Structures are given as structure tokens and as C-alpha cells.
């Protein structure tokens, strides 16, 4: 290739050129699989399975996305490889050539990728009634939020900070527990461990039963989501896009 493709670090990493080459090989593998599907004589034992790397945010995976991915993988010679990251960072996986498709909060796709709006995921700041009594008996304000432990997915998760900034019109330093799981968020909130921004679809029953309550009623935070995928990777990617748009239309609010 006339240039370095690998950085011999621990662990070994690809250079920018190396990542582009790997991305090209991934796309060629998909085109070859599509050809074997239309010309069975090329693959008498059936088409070989290829890996489909996708980057998603945890809240989408825990609510509306998993059934769509499972449905198409069940009927195709594909091995799905899901990577979970914050919706504001999944586009970086596309840009680095690590994945072929992603659910992302970024509007503009990287070069060589197409983007489709999915809708808005609504989150609500909620916790247990006992937690509200313990930390917010005097109301939800900057002073009480500074004392009350919050829940975050990881260091990239800024949903709680965004909600607080909108509520208080200022940045507030939040104590936080780190729980890298949408379902663990719910379990922790039910147990009174902390408060956090939960997908509305994931806690609707708990809100209805009053096992969870909103910190401030009717203050949802909407997160616009987009589906971005490699341009002209294969007809299969286009089919996957169709499968993803259907549950997104049911599970998300209009953009």
C-alpha cells in the first residue's frame, strides 16, 4: 500500500489508511455475499456468514431496536456485532471505519454514509418516592441536586447534566453512580440508589404504579436519533434500514 496500515501499540491499532482499507474489505464481503445469494452455484454449501458491526446507544437497544436486529438476523447469513456507546459518540465508530451502521444523535453523517431521521426518544428524570422524600423534600433545585446522587451510564453520558442545566439555568456539579446498563438504571432508581434520565417507554409501568416518580412533573428531555449507514454497502444494509425504521416509527416520537 506504500504507507503504514498498523500502529504496533498494545493493543495493535490501525492507522487512518488501515481503517479505510478494513472498511473497504467489509463492504466487499457484503457485496460478495449478495452475489452468492443471487448465484447459488458460487456457494453450493450456502452463503458464508459475514459480520455486521453496528454501534447503538443503550437506551435504543433496551427499548425499540433489538427486535428489528433480531428479526433480520434470524433470516439472513449474518452475525450481528453490536457496540454500545453514547448516542453523541456512535458516529465516531462510523468515522473510524469500525462499524457499517449506527444509531446516533448526530445529524450530519460522516463522508461515505447516508443518514435517516428515526424520531425523538423521550426521557424522564425519575426515582423512587422514598428517594424524593430523602433528598428533595424541600424541592428540586441546584442546592438539593448537588447533594443527591445521580445515575449515569458512563463518563460520556450528559443527559442528567443537560436536564439540570435546562431546569436550573446553570451548570450544577452532580454526584453520580456509574451504571452502564439501561435496565440497571431502572433497578437502581427503584431501589432508591439515585435519580436519572430514563427512556419513557422503559419506565411507563413504574410511573403508572407510582413505584417511580418524576423529580419535576412533565419535564421530559427529548433526544433526536438518526440511522446512519455505509452508502451502497449492499442491498442487505438497505433491507436492514427498512427493518429499523418500522419499530422506530412505533417507539419514537416524530422528529
Image (cartoon, grey):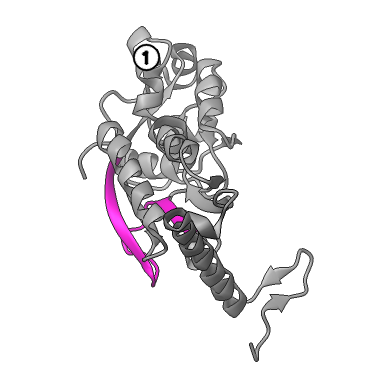
- Residue that extends furthest to the left in the rendered view of this protein: 254
56 or 188, which lies in front? 56
Q: Position of residue 192 (x, y in %)?
A: 54, 17
Foreground pick, 213 / 234:
234
Q: Residue at x 44, y 55 (%)?
A: 101
Q: Quadrant of the N terminus?
A: bottom right
Q: Is residue 103 above or below residue 230?
A: above
Is residue 237 toward the left or the right of residue 179 in the image? left
Residue 97: in sight, yes or no?
A: no
Asked whether 19 or 79 is in front, the reply is 79
Number of marks in the image?
1
Q: Is residue 104 within the magenta segment?
A: yes
**Is 148 rendered above or below residue 120?**
above
Residue drawn at x 43%, y 40% is 72
Please identify the quarter of the rendering in which residue 167 is found. top left
Quarter of the image with the C terminus in it: top left
- Farthest-out residue, top: 209
The residue that disc 1 covers is: 205
| Element marked by disc 1 | helix
Residue 118 in view in this figure: yes
Q: Nearer the viewer, residue 239 or 44?
A: 44
Which residues are drawn in magenta? 99-121
Q: Is residue 236 magenta?
A: no
Q: Could you say where residue 8 lies in the image, as x and y percent from the top left?
A: 77, 74
Residue at (46%, 38%) from the top-left corner?
Answer: 75
Q: Position of residue 65 (x, y in %)?
A: 41, 37
Amino acid at each position: 500500500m506504500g504507507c503504514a496500515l498498523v500502529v504496533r501499540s498494545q493493543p495493535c491499532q490501525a492507522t487512518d489508511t488501515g481503517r479505510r482499507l478494513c472498511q473497504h474489505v467489509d463492504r466487499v464481503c457484503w457485496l460478495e455475499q449478495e452475489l452468492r445469494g443471487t448465484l447459488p452455484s458460487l456457494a453450493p454449501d450456502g452463503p458464508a456468514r459475514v459480520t455486521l458491526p453496528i454501534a447503538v446507544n443503550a437506551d435504543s437497544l433496551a427499548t425499540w431496536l433489538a427486535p428489528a436486529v433480531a428479526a433480520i438476523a434470524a433470516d439472513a447469513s449474518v452475525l450481528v456485532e453490536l457496540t454500545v456507546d453514547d448516542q453523541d459518540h456512535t458516529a465516531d465508530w462510523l468515522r473510524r471505519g469500525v462499524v457499517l451502521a449506527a444509531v446516533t444523535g448526530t445529524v450530519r453523517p460522516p463522508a461515505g454514509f447516508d443518514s435517516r431521521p428515526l424520531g425523538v426518544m423521550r426521557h424522564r428524570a425519575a426515582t423512587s418516592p422514598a428517594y424524593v422524600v430523602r433528598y428533595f423534600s424541600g424541592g428540586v433545585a441546584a442546592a438539593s441536586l448537588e447533594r443527591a446522587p445521580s445515575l449515569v451510564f458512563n463518563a460520556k453520558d450528559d443527559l442528567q447534566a443537560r436536564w439540570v442545566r435546562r431546569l436550573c439555568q446553570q451548570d450544577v456539579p452532580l454526584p453520580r453512580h456509574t451504571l452502564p446498563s439501561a435496565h440497571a438504571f431502572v433497578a437502581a432508581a427503584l431501589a432508591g440508589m439515585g435519580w436519572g434520565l430514563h427512556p419513557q417507554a422503559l419506565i411507563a409501568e413504574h410511573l403508572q404504579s407510582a413505584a417511580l416518580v418524576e423529580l419535576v412533573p412533565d419535564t421530559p428531555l427529548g433526544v433526536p436519533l438518526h440511522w446512519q449507514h455505509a452508502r451502497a454497502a449492499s442491498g442487505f444494509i438497505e433491507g436492514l434500514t427498512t427493518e429499523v425504521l418500522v419499530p422506530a416509527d412505533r417507539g419514537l416520537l416524530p422528529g
